[in-house]
Amino acid sequence: MLWNPLSGAIELGLLYALMALGVYITFRILDFPDLTVDGSFTTGAAIAAIMISNGSSPWVACLAAFVGGLVAGACTGLLHTKGKINGLLSGILMMIALYSINMRILDGKPNISLLGADTVFSGLPRKVWEISSIALVMLVITIIVKILLDLFMKTDLGLALRATGDNKRMIRSFGANTDTTTIIGVSLSNGLVALSGAFIAQQSGFADITMGIGMIVIGLASVIIGEAIFGARTVFRATLAVILGSIVYRIVVTFALRIDWFETSDLKLITAIIVIIALVFPTVRRVLKQKSMAKKRSAELLGSANPNTGGGR
């Protein structure tokens, strides 16, 4: 049935939506190319998995995963602002370091199973009103995080964060410390990414050392698709667009994999194609709009140069 894959895609989209919101903070608000995401996603999953497997509360494990992501992001921010290392290189260095750190968190094992352990999704009915109960839980969590993020962006610190990405020199002239706002923004971003990793680990029943590979591309795809389709004129609309973009991305991937000449191993190729289309689409639309306006203006100028004098007296 069509609804089953669609329901699964929506569920995955909501699970990855927090990660997409994290990427939105660095990619759009701070204009910071942060590749720490691939490592911090696994960090969140690893922390949650090891704590839950040792008997901790799944919600406490999620909170610890969020804090772990904050620390990872803060390290990247410090490397860039205080160490004066290029932003892209800072993220790459932290991503490499996190691989070894994540292996230590996982106690030297490549993966940790959560089968049979209590998670935030344990005890839930499989479906409620023909909708995945996991999707409903994640919808509530995602909405709460979105509202908190929107409120934060309206505070003085949030406005300073947004201004840092727009014009660092201007915000410095007002006495703001752009190093601090950059560190806070990158930390918050990776905290949300790690939180998403914690939920993914509990939903899938395991945490794996390689599960974060390619997360930055998926996050960028969600942000770009959301902005291309739904627009991003305000923070409220932008964060909503990112969440919807995450869902749309998963729906497109799900139905693309159902095409006969696509295989499961083609997931990265499909993601790349989707991102390319999402990046090119606004440019093509803008060019077509400009051509249409130019033709209209040319017609108006031609009409004014050759007025209709028919029916003279």
Image (cartoon, rainbow, N blue to C red):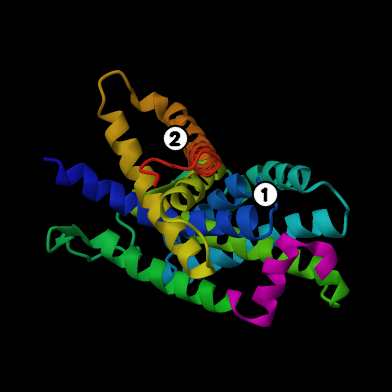
Q: Does residue 43 show up magenta in the picture?
A: no
Amino acid carrying mark 2 in the image: Ile
At label 1, which amino acid type do we have? Answer: Asp
Q: Which mark is residue 34?
A: 1
Nearer to me, 210 or 293: 293
- Please give the name of the residue rendered at 42% of the width and 66% of the height, measured from the top-left corner: 55
> Residue 134, how many percent across, how many down?
28, 60
Q: Residue furthest bottom?
A: 155
- The residue located at (39%, 70%) in the rendering is 143
Q: Where does residue 183 sit, x and y in percent of width and height?
A: 74, 64
Q: Secondary structure at mark 2?
A: helix
> Overall secondary structure of the magenta stretch?
helix
The residue indicated by pointer 2 is: 274
Q: Which residues are magenta?
A: 153-170
| Label 1 to label 2: alpha-carbon separation | 21 Å
Q: Residue furthest top?
A: 261
Looking at the image, which is closer to me, 231 or 245?
231
Left-right relation of 81 to 272: right
**Horizontal side of residue 66 vs 250, given as left or right:** right
- Residue at point 57%, 49% (across, down): 107
- Of the two numbered discs 1 and 2 on the same chain, state the one appearing first in sequence: 1
Taking the image as shown, residue 7 lies to the left or right of residue 27, namely left
Residue 137 sits above or below residue 262 on the image: below
**What is the x, y in percent for residue 80?**
81, 54
